[in-house]
Image (cartoon, rainbow, N blue to C red):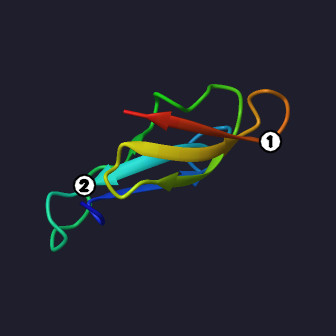
Amino acid sequence: GGGLQLCFATSGRSATSDIYCATRSTLSQPFGAITPLSSINSSTAAETGPWLSEDGHYIVFSSNRSGYRSLYEATR
């Protein structure tokens, strides 16, 4: 359900901006370890502005991996 996963973009942890996520088991618990979303982060491009569906199975984000800033989507 909603509120159990948090995704955000930051450039403070790598040379380019990447997307990181953290999860928790209940709304009353703190979020756990922050981990990079390596399945969509690229090594040379900047990924920003993630939007995650409430069920956590669909994400939309911005990246310049094609040389232009574009929107991308992924599912799991």
Is disc 1 placed on a helix, strand or loop? loop
Which quadrant of the view contains residue 66? top right
Number of numbered discs:
2
> Is 28 left or right of 2, judged from the image as shown?
left
Q: State the residue at coordinates (31%, 52%).
A: 55
Q: Earlier along the polypeptide chain: callout 1 or callout 2?
A: 2
Q: Which residue is mark 1?
A: 69
Q: Residue 71 at x, y = what percent?
A: 69, 42
Q: Is residue 6 above or below residue 74?
A: below
Mark 2 crowdedness (10 Å alpha carbons): few <14, some 14-19, many ≥20: few
Q: State the residue at coordinates (56%, 32%).
A: 41
> Identity of the amino acid at label 2?
Gly
Q: Is residue 21 above or below residue 76?
A: below
- Judging depth in this view, the residue of 13 and 60 nearest the camera is 60
Q: State the residue at coordinates (42%, 54%).
A: 53
Q: State the residue at coordinates (71%, 32%).
A: 45
> Is 59 left or right of 4, judged from the image as shown?
right
Q: Residue 48 at x, y = what percent?
A: 64, 49
Task: Residue 32: give its label.
Answer: 2
> Is 8 left or right of 23, judged from the image as shown?
right
Can residue 17 be seen here?
A: no
Is disc 2 placed on a helix, strand or loop? loop
Q: Residue 9 at x, y = what percent?
A: 57, 52
- Judging depth in this view, the residue of 71 and 7 nearest the camera is 71
Which quadrant of the view contains residue 3? bottom left
Q: Quadrant of the C terminus?
A: top left
Can residue 76 be seen here?
A: yes
